[in-house]
Image: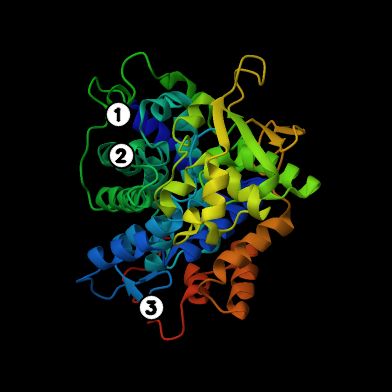
Amino acid sequence: MSFALELAKRINAITFNELPPEAVHCAKVGILDTVGVTLAGARDDATRIVAKVSLAEASAGPSLVFGAGRRVHPLEAALVNGTASHALDFDDCNNTLGGHPSVPILPGLIALAEDIGASGRNFIAAYVAGFETECKLSLGVNFHQYTRGWHPTTTIGVFGGAAACAKLMGLPDDRIAVALAIAASLAAGIKSNFGTMVKPPHVGHCARSGLFAALLAREGFTANDRAFEHKQGYFNVFNGPGNYDAAKILPAWADPLDIVSTGIAIKQYPCCGSTHPALDATLTLAREHKIEPEAIERAEVWIHARRLEHTNRPDPRTALDAKFSLQYCVARAIADRRIGIEHFEGNAFDEPAVRHLTARVRAAPYTTGQFPDENHFGAEVRLTLRGGRTLCARVDEPLGRTAANPLPPERLIEKFENCAARVLAPGAVSRLQETIQRLDAVGDIRDLTALIALPGDPRPVTRRAARA
């Protein structure tokens, strides 16, 4: 039996009725957070340009484009909403995947669910199945892909999107296997484009590709059933011989479900997650000691070498570049004692006072003995004040990074409200939040997306009835 078919059988075995309550709860957390950050990113420049190009001649369809006042074909909605979901780099993370687990799945899944009128229960089960697919695949192929320069959120996440969409359509095992094999040829994304407008469309393309693969499989498209293990298949092409271990993937399936443990990491700050441990440490010092920026002689930061590689940017030149600048993020945390969306908009990164402070931040990889070798989520920060006084703080992992160290519920709600309010009226924000929290009782996902629609948005054009 091929690897794709083995995986497909496990995907189809996940049902809502057999999900543990904590998995349903975690799914709602991921959906709430993703809807919020997608709304916040809906009018970002990257999203706007992708929409302008991809929707120029789009006809009316069933699927809502967040914050845009129109409905289009599900594939087009997946592309634009997927770009919006990652535009602010504020979306959730997962330690097993080594990337962002929800955004490769949910934009395509929401677009499809609107088309077929899926129930909240089936939607949750499909999301959990997609989440499990991408995370367990990661056990066999990451962190090699990440280190090599691939963007695992999309090069692995595309399988999560394909699995979720195929499951929501009720495809049989052999058709889900085809969807996964198709997705193997659609995987894409390289880290050299981090810090530019290209990174958000990585996710838009991924969300669209996962849905596209599932739709093709539904219509009878064919693919190599050994697209993973073939000598020129996914494992060898993306990792290279000897750099993956497929034997780790299937035995770990649903033991436990990855959405439960390691769980969903909710971002507190709208910037690269690799900066977050240092931000937690810096904000602790800045707030406890009420440090003024002019008091800083120098700031020294240590994070894991793997994470420093793409965040060591002492001279950011754009707002997007600043999201990946450890130096700027630490300087901003000292200057404002907080990190918000507005700190990565316009020319905020170029404010003279913050630019001056950024130049005082020095970044380096962990040294021997600072953290255990296997911990790549820690950070140590040392601030030297004028006069010679030093202040130090360290964290083993940022708050919210694992299910064992979750972001408090009130912080999650606060983040959602701040994000969603950039597009929706306050009353709509609260109704949307309440609906997601009872999503398993929602009979049609269009009842949820109706709350995201703006006044004057067209009603959905239903093309296909939902499958039982």
Report which residue position mark 3 lands on. Answer: 69
The kind of residue on which mark 3 rests is Gly
Residue 240 visible (yes or no): yes
> Given this view, does label 3 or label 1 mark the residue nearer the observer?
3
Compute the Cα span from label 3 to label 1. Answer: 39 Å
Q: Position of residue 394 (x, y in %)?
A: 71, 32
Q: Are marks 3 and 1 in contact (CB under 8 Å)?
A: no
Of residues 250 and 451, the one drawn nearer to the viewer in this rendering: 451
Callout 2: SS:
loop
Report which residue position mark 2 lands on. Answer: 187
| Residue occupying image coordinates x 47% and y 72% | 446
**Quadrant containing the C terminus in the rendered view:** bottom left
Q: Position of residue 276 (x, y in %)?
A: 60, 41
Q: Residues within 10 Å of mark 1 (few under 14, many from 20)?
A: many
The kind of residue on which mark 2 rests is Ala
Of residues 161 and 100, the one drawn nearer to the viewer in this rendering: 100
Callout 3: SS:
loop
